Amino acid sequence: MVNLRIPGPTPVPDEVLQAMAKQMINHRGPEFKELMNDVTAKLKTVFQTKNDVLTLTAAGTGGLEAAIVNTLSPGDKVLATSIGVFGDRFTKIAQTYGADVTPLNFEWGKAADVNAIRKALQADPKIKAVLVTQNETSTGVTNDLAAICPVVKEFDKLLLVDAISGLGAIDLPVDKWHCDVTVTGSQKAWMVPPGLTMVSVSEEAWQAHAEAKMPRFYFDFSKAKSNLEKGQTPWTPAVSIIFALQVALDMILKEGLANVFARHIRVAKAARDGIKSLGLSLFADERYVSETVTPVVAPPGLDVKAMLKILREAHQVVLAGGQQDLSGKIFRIGHLGWVTEKDIAGVISALKVALPQAGLAGG
């Protein structure tokens, strides 16, 4: 079996795969209503929210676009924090729809500085919303949302959170931290194939939605909410993926959220310790390392592309390379969703063999 260790899509348990083999049902019928009501209630438990949770058929990026267009109008001032590729993507979506964006970029490998966010909000009282990435897979850094959220709310701003690669693996109490729109994706910690983005919407976000003027149709929260009240979706949903999500949610809740978070902490530590045992260095600031992905600095002489090929073809271990400016400079080990320490041990063992074959002297 292939040891798929990228930041998503993640491996899918057999029980979840089997759920997708079910015959189709009427997405306007009573069976689907029962399914959606059950899935929505369980999603709220994992989101740790009493707010609305909407399930949209799209990749996570669709959820980010939905967060922007449902709460903002062209010309609205937005503070967009970014610590990597996906923070930049969130920024670009807001810019594309005409928001007046103030980028607040931080060095890749570092977390967002809370004081810098406070200063930016103090400097421009007209800022309406703040964009934050919970967990940046391109750099392996998790922002300190527990510290960032109170600052954003101190200035009474909307808080839009990209939690695509963190929610379900890293603790994010949506209501406690007053996140207004929180976005995640099925192919990450949820142990489900790609195809769904799940979004929580606070009362404050609904108030903003009532005034928002950005164009929207497919991603309109009002349509999603009114249909969900009937146990439906406004457009044809990815029925098979929702079957899968129901089973995966049952697995998550049976394990228990606290145990899921603790398992990810253990597995991430195993990955970091294993990398260090090979004499390699971590890319991310260790104060803010991600529990879902570990980026590793490629030392001089290591051909990352060749190493990834050796791992894939000779060891059935699939890792991710670096993105954009980090291409060839790092490689990344994903460890979120259906993952244990044994999976990571297999990665480390394979790396011991592949590193010297890919040019690492003394590897």
Image: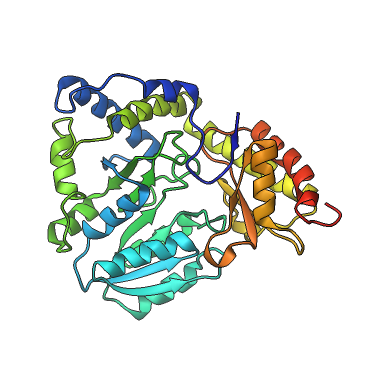
**Residue 90 visible:** yes
Seen from this angle, which residue lies furthest bottom? 123
- Residue 268 in which image quadrant: top right
Seen from this angle, which residue lies furthest right? 362
* Quadrant holding the N terminus: top right
Is the residue 125 above or below the residue 280 in the image? Answer: below
Relative horizontal placement of residue 220, taking residue 345 as reference (left or right): left
**Residue 154 visible:** no
Q: Which residue is rendered at x = 26% and y = 75% of the image?
A: 126
Is the residue 351 above or below the residue 208 in the image? Answer: above
How many circles with numbers are drawn on the protein? 0
Q: Which residue is rendered at x = 66% and y = 40% of the image?
A: 313
Q: Position of residue 54 (x, y in %)?
A: 26, 41
Q: Position of residue 176 (x, y in %)?
A: 38, 47
Q: How is the image coloured?
A: rainbow
- Residue 323 in which image quadrant: bottom right
Q: Pick the residue in front: 61 or 316.
A: 316
